[in-house]
Amino acid sequence: MKRADILDTAKEYVTKDRAASHGDMECNFGRIAALWTIQLADRLDGPVKASDVALMMALLKVARACSNPAHLDNWIDLAGYAACGGELMTPE
């Protein structure tokens, strides 16, 4: 798979496929952040943010790619989480 194909697939996932299955990205990442904050409350200085979710999910994909670098889904999802994080951090 070429890099453009990976990016095109990630774009499709984050704009169509996963959004239809999992709902609005910002709302979903916010919900995940709230739940992670509850789970980690005794170990945190402050709340987990939606942008933290994007970074930590990207790190999850990095860890999985280290275990199985030939599994393209890890690379596609890594690009997708990077795009989601960038969007979350872009001022409106």
Image (cartoon, rainbow, N blue to C red):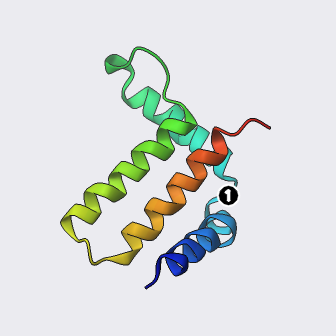
Q: Residue furthest right?
A: 92
| Rendering coords of residue 90 (x, y %) | 69, 40
Q: In the picture provided, is 52 more to the left or to the right than 16?
A: left
What amino acid does circle 1 point to? Gly
Q: In the picture provided, is 28 more to the left or to the right than 46?
A: right
State which quadrant residue 63 falls in: bottom left
Q: Residue furthest bottom?
A: 1
Q: Residues within 10 Å of mark 1 (few under 14, many from 20)?
A: few
Instruction: Establish if 88 lies above or below 63.
Output: above
* Residue at image coords 37%, 68%: 74
Name the foreground residue: 28 vs 88: 88
Name the foreground residue: 89 vs 4: 4
Q: In the picture provided, is 89 more to the left or to the right than 43?
A: right
Count of numbered labels shown in the rendering: 1
Q: Residue furthest top?
A: 45
Report the residue marked by disc 1: 23
**Quadrant in the picture for the N terminus:** bottom left
Instruction: Establish if 90 lies above or below 46.
Output: below
Instruction: Establish if 50 lies above or below 57.
Output: above
* Residue at image coords 46%, 70%: 76
Instruction: Establish if 14 lies above or below 28.
Output: below
| Rendering coords of residue 31 (x, y %) | 58, 40
* Residue at image coords 63%, 67%: 21
| Rendering coords of residue 41 (x, y %) | 39, 21
* Residue at image coords 38%, 30%: 39
**Quadrant in the picture for the C terminus:** top right
Q: Residue furthest left?
A: 67
Name the foreground residue: 32 vs 8: 8
